[in-house]
Amino acid sequence: QVQLQESGPDLVKPSQTLSLTCTVSGGSITTAYYYWSWIRQPPGKGLDWIGYIGYSGSTTYKPSLNGRTSISRDTSKNQFTLQLSSVTPEDTAVYYCARRLATGGYDYWGQGTQVTVSS
């Protein structure tokens, strides 16, 4: 059974960088062909895909985030990390990490963590 757990601050000031870590247990983040994803849900809105880091370490990001996103990994800790720079209140959301299949669906999710951007 794969488990994912998000961790990080719940309050970030505008213009700062949001940083969240997802710790994975029960499976390696280097196992083919899985893609370790970040997804968020702003209040009152639907799910919004942010990006992923693949089993090989390659990354793909949502273009409309205009280069503010970086996803990295620490294979020794079986963790992957999201950094979102220059945040605004519009980045307030529940942030989820999830495992994406090669077919495009998701089979495991973290419980989600609320991040609020406010001064």
Image (tube, rainbow, N blue to C red):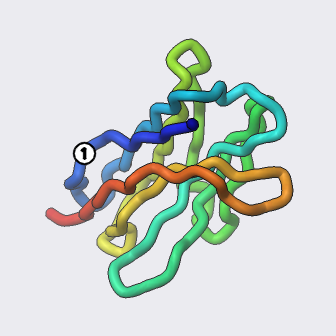
Residue 115, quarter of picture: bottom left
Considering depth in this image, is 47 or 89 the residue closer to the camera? 47
Q: Residues within 10 Å of mark 1 (few under 14, many from 20)?
A: few
x then y, percent, for residue 83: 47, 44
Tag 1 residue: 9
Residue 59, quarter of picture: top right
- Determine the secondary structure under disc 1: loop
Name the side, left or right, on which 71 lies relative to 31: left
Residue positioned 20% across, 54% down in the render: 11
Outermost residue toward the front in this view: 1
x then y, percent, for residue 13: 22, 56
Outermost residue toward the left in this view: 119
x then y, percent, for residue 90: 37, 75
Residue positioned 50% across, 17% down in the render: 77
Considering depth in this image, is 2 or 11 the residue closer to the camera? 2
x then y, percent, for residue 65: 58, 65
Residue positioned 45% across, 50% down in the render: 110
